[in-house]
Amino acid sequence: MGERIEEECGVAAVYMKNRTENSGYVPHALNLMLEALQHRGQTGTGITIYHEHNGASGKTFRHRKKTSSAAEFFGLEGVDEFYNGISGLGHVRYGTSGDREESSDSTQPFYRRHGENSKRFAIAYNGNIANYNELRQQFAAQHFDLETEVDTEVLMHLLSKSLDAREGYSNDNAREIWEEVCNSVDGAYSIATLLDNGVLNILRDPQGFKPLVYGETEECYAFASETVALKQLGITQFNSVEPGNLVVVEDNDLKFEKINEAARAHCHFEYVYFMNKASHFEGESVFSIRQNLGRALAEKEPLAEDLKAHPGDYVIVPVPESAIPAAEAFAYHFNAPYMSALDRINPKRGFINAEKKRDRIMSSKYQIIPEVVDGKKVILIDDSIVRSETLKKVISLFRGGGNPSEVHVRVTEPPIKHPCFYGVDFASFNELIANVDTNGRQLEDVVAQRIDADSFVFMDIDRLGSAVEMNPEDICNACLTGNYPTPFGNVRADEMRE
């Protein structure tokens, strides 16, 4: 498979209960939600808002995209004042593989212009389409002009074709339209679509790979990739959009339609790494799950006897930010000192960027506090290890400026040995450190040598499953096991193996 854009992003949508007048609350709410989702996307921000003209001339869609953070986006040009309306959607984006386009053309939402308002819409999504190659080839054969390598453009064309075949969108054909789209798509998708009558269509794939939640205030209904975004609007009661469900938001009401069904496959990497620790995933606290992961690491700790006998010789240090709850629970288990000796000075996530950019980010990502680790046996707790670049640089920082007696590494994720085709940037077999040639040695010993650690320990899959507090059959562990839950996940993996 050729290199292309994959995305790990965040979506948000809002629908005012009072549709009689345009409101500045719409961009204000999107601002709050997208800033709360900033950890999911830092290379681009976009919004599309439906502005009711009540018979007057002018554009009904107010559409803006920019390659900037949410804070920079909403801090420019009076966005809150101009982009008032009755409903809208927003998006924050990472470009996570391929050439990682960072132009506004690749930033969402995508807007489909059309002379008929029933065929005009904006669309944003989080996920990755596993059969993107096949769909792209089909559109090319039909002489569609694909301007980007972003999955969203393919979804836009599928929806456009379905609308054209039915003379546009109406209250009665939403289910039929989306059934046709979903029957063409294999992969992960949490979709927010804004129609040119202010109606929202919200859709989640049948496996429920990515989180998608909703709630309401007195003013509006709101949807987002994480509950932490809804909390910014004062929402404390929230629900997950059920996998395979379409939610139609119109006439101050939510209408739920079951589009398709499949075995659930919630992405476990969401709660290990991506989600904000204050969020909930399928009703479970992400913070509590990460604490469970720390306790699970403590249960298999090879230095347990020495830690219990001489806790003062050690210092437990988290690699910020996702691993902090796990490190706290690990230290508490052994009554050992816990110190934030590693200060994160660059908030951007490294593994999800292009190689040259990753190197620049990680070179300026952390600084250490040498007094904390001087003469100590350091146990670094990290959430995962993908390519080993970050940890290798971190350990070099400790050894070069902190004078620890030993440096040990523990990660809350089992060995990642397989690519992900559902939206996480594990793009090939050979870039994964867990696939290194061990020459008969233990993988953990080889990894420890590679990153210059005194010892290294992975989480194991059984303990991971117990920590998550979900039915193991509802979890996607494809990047750990190679068992892909959709047909085209297996197709893509077979292509890479060949």
Image: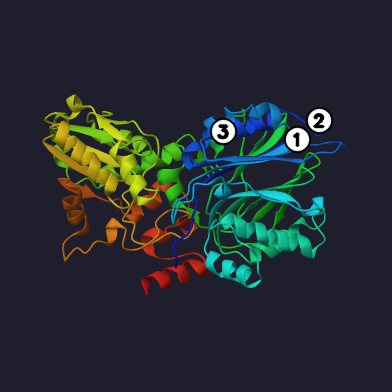
Q: Quadrant of residue 61?
A: top right
Alpha carbon of mark 1 to alpha carbon of mark 2: how far?
7 Å
Q: Nearer the viewer, residue 488 or 484?
A: 488
Q: Residues within 10 Å of mark 1 (few under 14, many from 20)?
A: many
Q: Sequence-wise, which precedes: disc 3 or disc 2?
A: 2
Tell me where residue 145 appears, x and y as whole percent.
63, 63
Which quadrant is home to the C terminus? bottom left
Amino acid of disc 3: Phe
Q: State the residue lying farthest toward the top.
A: 371
| Residue type for callout 1 | Ile
Label 3 vs label 2: CA separation? 25 Å
Q: Is residue 47 above or below residue 5?
A: above
| The image quarter in which residue 357 lies | top left
Location of mark 2 (residue): 21
> Residue 195, relative to residue 45: is it above or below?
below
In the displayed image of the protein, which residue is found farthest to the right?
55
Look at 52% across and 63% down and name the residue there: 130
Residue 400: name its quadrant: top left
Whole-percent x and y of residue 472? 45, 56
- Name the residue located 80 percent from the left edge and 63 percent from the top edge: 166
Q: CA distance from mark 1 to mark 3?
A: 20 Å
Label disc, if present, on residue 86 of the rendered structure: 1
Residue 412 shows in the view: no
- In terms of depth relative to the viewer, which is nearer, 362 or 87? 362
The tag earlier along the polypeptide, 1 or 2, is 2
Question: Are the residues at dot 1 and dot 2 in contact (C-beta closer than 8 Å)?
Answer: yes
